[in-house]
């Protein structure tokens, strides 16, 4: 599921996805746009926080690809010889409860005599497919936490899943974030919701700190080694996404963002009562717009696949392609429009927060212009509008609705909106909705525990999120 899942994210580059399919709780998004996603709280630190301060001895999750319902717990490894607590190491264990129940039921343990029941139960617990174990080490190279080096390795019982290894370096510069990352194998999620394992993925990214209004840019380089394969053996065979084919890619994205406030409350907040979330304490109606450009240079099999993909979509942007040397250069423009409305200060006990957010994305300006030109020609010639032209000018729409229920608890739903143009009545449907219950951690200013569920992917997860709007 979309990293921190909300539609306000990923404005002009892909971000990580939250998923219970890995012990680290994340998957990379297709297209492989590179890193520079900034420093986030790692999954072991999230679980450690919930164990220490939220009375949660086990953290639940659910994934149909990992035998269903599981429980996770973290064991912190002390390092007494380190100073200033600059080294954090953990062992993260996962126990597949649903797998155990199915094994016990199939083996007939419950029907055995009482004398042998306990021995049979211990034998079932020795099944390695019930367990998963991950080691994570985070080292702060400087006292101000501007440089963080992370190593993680996770292994799964049974023969269906291989171990995953990751190394990440986060470096905070005065006005940029630098990230260097290598994963083997890397888990990716494509637009159709399928997961792919890539044997080797390495990337380096540099991103400017995105201002509330103004210019920002993102530079990245990534390498993919080896042919991807479907993560789940139950998925039907399908074509590999072109951007996941082996090769080297360089990408640059530049954008300018402008915010407009139509109305912002000038009323004072309640005295001596701290909002449940400081980022959600000001009623307002606002909008923002983003316009930018992307340039991608690729070398290898991914350049050929990327060219085929753009040809099938009617790509009309700037492009150069040299099949003999497997090189391609693609450039295009993009735009995004967002609208946000909020009522309430999120201070009172009941129904003091109602928030609506919508976003329209135009990922390819060249496709939009070519579609608009074709549509104008059809109208001038009194012809029926071409369906392909209508699809080209239609933006990708996403909405989010959040409502406080009581105190720090609020309910949230996020979804993409799809209009079926082939239907004469223009049927509107929700695509990939995600339902979430949030618990605001008021003492931290802006932090929350989130339990979300995706009906389409049948995934459930509990995680912590800090300083999100």
Image (cartoon, helix red, strand yellow):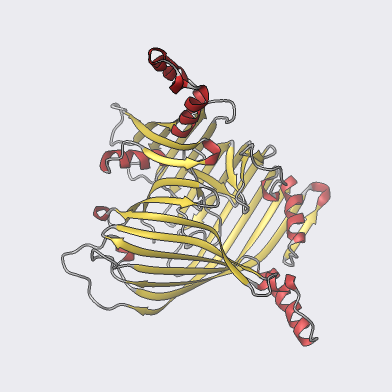
Q: Residue placed farthest to the top in the image?
A: 115
Which image quadrant for residue 264? Answer: bottom left
Instruction: Choose between 163 and 138: the one closer to the eye.
Output: 163
**Count of numbered marks:** 0
Q: Position of residue 459 (x, y in %)?
A: 50, 46
Q: Determine the residue positioned at 51% across, 29% down.
A: 155
Instruction: Choose between 77 and 348: the one closer to the eye.
Output: 348
Q: Position of residue 92 (x, y in %)?
A: 41, 32
Q: Is residue 146 above or below residue 399?
A: above
Q: Determine the residue positioned at 38% across, 12% down.
A: 115
Q: Would residue 23 be visible to someone looking at this image?
A: no
The quarter of the rendered structure image containing the C terminus is: bottom left
With 303 as the anchor, is 99 left or right in this view? left
Instruction: Choose between 154 and 204: the one closer to the eye.
Output: 154
Q: Position of residue 41 (x, y in %)?
A: 39, 45
Q: Determine the residue positioned at 70% across, 77% down.
A: 372
Instruction: Choose between 104 and 52: the one closer to the eye.
Output: 104
Q: Residue placed farthest to the left in the image?
A: 272
With 208 as the anchor, is 159 left or right in this view? right
Q: Would residue 232 be visible to someone looking at this image?
A: yes
Q: Is residue 309 above or below residue 351?
A: above
Q: Is residue 365 above or below residue 160?
A: below
Q: Is residue 300 above or below residue 274?
A: above
Q: Position of residue 100 (x, y in %)?
A: 46, 28
With 433 as the anchor, is 81 left or right in this view? left
With 88 as the anchor, is 368 left or right in this view? right
């Amino acid at each position: 599921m979309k990293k921190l899942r909300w539609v306000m994210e990923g404005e002009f580059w892909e971000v990580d996805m939250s998923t219970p399919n890995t012990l680290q709780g994340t998957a990379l998004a297709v297209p492989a746009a590179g890193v520079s996603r900034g420093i986030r709280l790692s999954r072991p630190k999230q679980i450690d926080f919930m164990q220490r301060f939220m009375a949660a001895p086990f953290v639940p999750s659910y994934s149909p690809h990992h035998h269903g319902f599981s429980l996770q717990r973290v064991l912190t490894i002390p390092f007494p010889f380190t100073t200033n607590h600059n080294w954090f190491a953990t062992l993260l264990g996962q126990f597949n409860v649903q797998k155990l129940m199915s094994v016990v039921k199939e083996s007939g343990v419950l029907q055995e005599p009482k004398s042998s029941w306990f021995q049979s139960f211990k034998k079932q617990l020795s099944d390695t497919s019930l367990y998963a174990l991950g080691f994570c080490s985070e080292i702060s190279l400087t006292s101000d936490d501007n440089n963080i080096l992370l190593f993680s390795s996770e292994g799964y019982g049974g023969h269906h899943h291989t171990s995953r290894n990751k190394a990440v370096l986060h470096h905070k510069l005065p006005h940029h974030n630098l990230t260097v990352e290598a994963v083997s194998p890397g888990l990716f999620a494509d637009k159709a919701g399928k997961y792919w394992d890539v044997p080797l993925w390495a990337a380096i990214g540099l991103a400017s700190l995105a201002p509330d209004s103004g210019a920002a840019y993102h530079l990245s380089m990534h390498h993919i080694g080896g042919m991807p394969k479907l993560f789940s053996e139950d998925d039907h065979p399908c074509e590999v996404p072109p951007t996941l084919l082996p090769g080297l890619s360089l990408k640059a994205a530049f954008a300018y963002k402008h915010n407009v406030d139509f109305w912002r409350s000038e009323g004072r907040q309640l005295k001596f009562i701290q909002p449940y979330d400081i980022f959600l304490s000001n009623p307002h109606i606002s909008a923002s717009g983003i316009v930018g450009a992307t340039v991608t240079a690729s070398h290898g099999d991914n350049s050929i696949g990327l060219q085929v993909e753009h040809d099938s979509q009617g790509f009309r942007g700037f492009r150069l392609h040299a099949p003999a040397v497997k090189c391609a250069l693609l450039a295009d423009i993009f735009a995004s429009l967002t609208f946000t409305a909020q009522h309430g200060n999120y201070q009172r006990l009941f129904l003091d927060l109602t928030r609506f957010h919508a976003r329209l994305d135009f990922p390819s300006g060249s496709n939009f212009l070519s579609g608009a030109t074709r549509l104008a020609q059809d109208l001038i010639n009194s012809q029926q509008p071409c369906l392909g032209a209508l699809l080209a000018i239609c933006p990708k729409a996403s909405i989010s609705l959040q409502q406080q229920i009581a105190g720090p608890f609020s309910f949230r739903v996020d979804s993409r909106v799809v209009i079926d143009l082939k239907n004469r009545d223009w049927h509107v449907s929700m695509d990939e909705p995600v339902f979430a219950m949030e618990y605001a951690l008021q003492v931290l200013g802006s932090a929350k525990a989130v339990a979300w569920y995706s009906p389409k992917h049948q995934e459930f997860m509990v995680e912590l999120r800090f300083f999100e709007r």
